[in-house]
Image: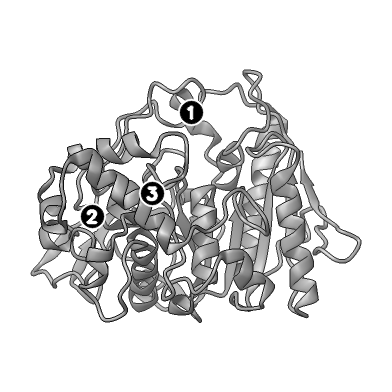
């Protein structure tokens, strides 16, 4: 694979690292600034020459989480990229040995963060191991908090569909469209894309598979700790989204959309946190266009995409009382009721060494990306073996819809008996 690749907008140049060619900070849409704040993502203008893609792009304005008790040390102990509304960038890892027409499977990662924060460049997300396994990884940034999910009747007058909000999900779909249009040049197969995400990223995946706007854009989906049926968060209504928007404008002391577009990004960010409190105020909502109903109703009515699925959660996950395991099992049972391909269900029970946090929400990320070396924990041989197994299952699923391989313990798909793979 060459370190310079042509895209629809222009040529990009990456670099070699660990057996992969890496491209950081590729713009997949126009900067959503100024009059494009609170608007759908627009195509990026072409550029002249070769765009250097050796540093991560900016992340959407958000809070600094480095001081959090568990997650600060776990994931946020390194400086983040700069924060800016100009944040619609993606990153690509492709095998060094890949030819432009290799048609390798593509894994498209959507980060979590309660729809309030997060970035595709977090230290646990790295595609070098996936590249060694013959899989191409894409990670993305998208608009979060109010930048990505502010909804208001005034905005609905600006478009034919009379909808607002959900910009963060539309960003994700725009990035997915960019991948389908350009990934062949990096050695990827645009017809073999697996979208996967964790927590809010998982909820994003479930929104995408529930939307007609993304029909046919991916072949598989992996839902990690946040999806299923009757899960953590019911998709709010348009009226609920409007109420969050009203509170934001009241907090900022503005009365028009024009005034809100003039509010400095840092002030808007802080207000988004102030009005959300402990609730999920900034999330995808039922707008009648991107989402015609809740994600639960889409699944129950058989309106989710008819593709291959993997779903699961952790022993000490959020929600308590095995809520996410039950939600995942209901999702798998619904697939059977619909007469579709059975899903693969997992349960991650390994309690991470080094402290008493256990198999906590997000703990599996080190294993999925096989990035144990980036973490402070005193890993044991069993962790390295488990990471190799988990990474193998995930990438095998991306290759052909089946996580199994001769060297791995057999993982049966979910049936009426309720099979699941215990990752311990």
Q: Note whether residue 259 is visible.
A: yes
Q: Residue furthest right?
A: 417
> Contact, CB < 8 Å: mark 2 with mark 3?
no
Crowding at mark 1 (Cα within 10 Å: few <14, some 14-19, many 20+) = some
**How far, Cα to Cα, is label 1 from label 3?**
16 Å
Q: How many marks?
A: 3
**How far, Cα to Cα, is label 2 from label 1?**
28 Å
Q: Mark 1 points at which residue?
A: 71
Report whether 62 appears left or right of 67. left
Report whether 66 appears left or right of 280. left
Quarter-of-image position of residue 223: bottom right
Q: Which of marks 2 and 1 is nearer the N terminus?
A: 2
Q: Foreground residue, 205 or 12?
A: 205
Q: Name the residue under label 3.
A: 120
Q: Name the residue under label 2.
A: 53
Give the residue displayed 51% in from the left and 74% down from the top: 218
> Contact, CB < 8 Å: mark 2 with mark 1?
no
Q: Foreground residue, 49 or 257?
A: 257
Question: What quarter of the picture does the C terminus occupy?
Answer: top right
Q: Where is residue 69 in the image (x, y as percent from the top left)?
A: 48, 20
SS at mark 2 in the image: loop
Report whether 71 appears left or right of 7. right
């Amino acid at each position: 694979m060459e370190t310079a690749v042509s895209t629809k907008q222009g040529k990009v140049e990456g670099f070699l690292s660990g057996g992969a060619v890496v491209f950081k900070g590729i713009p997949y849409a126009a900067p959503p600034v100024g009059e494009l704040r609170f608007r759908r993502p627009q195509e990026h203008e072409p550029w002249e020459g070769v765009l250097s893609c050796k540093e991560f792009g900016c992340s959407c304005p958000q809070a600094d989480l480095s001081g959090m008790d568990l997650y600060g040390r776990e994931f946020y102990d390194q400086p983040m990229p700069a924060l800016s509304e100009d944040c619609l960038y993606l990153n690509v890892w492709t095998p060094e040995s890949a030819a432009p027409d290799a048609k390798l499977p593509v894994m498209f990662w959507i980060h979590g963060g309660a729809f309030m924060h997060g970035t595709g460049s977090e230290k646990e997300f790295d595609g070098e191991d996936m590249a060694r396994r013959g899989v191409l990884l894409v990670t993305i940034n998208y608009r979060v908090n109010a930048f990505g999910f502010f909804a208001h009747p005034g905005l609905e007058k600006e478009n034919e569909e009379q909808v607002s909000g959900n910009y963060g999900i539309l960003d994700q779909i725009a990035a997915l469209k960019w991948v389908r249009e350009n990934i062949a040049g990096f050695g990827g197969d645009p017809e073999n894309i697996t979208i996967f995400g964790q927590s809010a990223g998982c909820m994003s995946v479930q929104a995408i598979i529930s939307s007609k706007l993304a029909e046919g854009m991916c072949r598989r989906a992996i839902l990690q700790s946040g999806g299923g049926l009757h899960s953590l968060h019911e998709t709010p209504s348009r009226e609920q989204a409007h109420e969050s928007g009203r509170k934001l404008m009241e907090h900022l002391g503005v009365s028009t959309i024009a005034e809100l577009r003039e509010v400095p990004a840092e002030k808007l960010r802080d207000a988004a946190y102030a009005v959300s409190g402990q609730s999920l105020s900034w999330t995808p909502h039922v707008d009648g266009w991107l989402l015609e109903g809740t994600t639960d109703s889409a699944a129950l009515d058989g309106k989710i995409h008819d593709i291959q699925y993997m779903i699961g959660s952790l022993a000490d996950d959020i929600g308590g009382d095995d809520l996410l395991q039950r939600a995942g099992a209901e999702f798998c049972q619904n697939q059977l009721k619909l007469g579709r391909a059975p899903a693969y269900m997992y349960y991650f029970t390994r309690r991470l060494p080094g402290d008493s946090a256990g198999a906590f929400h997000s703990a599996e990320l080190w294993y999925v990306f096989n990035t144990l070396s980036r973490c402070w924990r005193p890993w044991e041989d069993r962790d390295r073996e488990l990471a190799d197994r988990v990474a193998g299952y995930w990438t095998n699923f991306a290759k052909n819809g089946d996580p199994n391989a001769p060297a791995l313990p057999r993982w049966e798909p979910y049936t009426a008996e309720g099979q699941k793979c215990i990752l311990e």
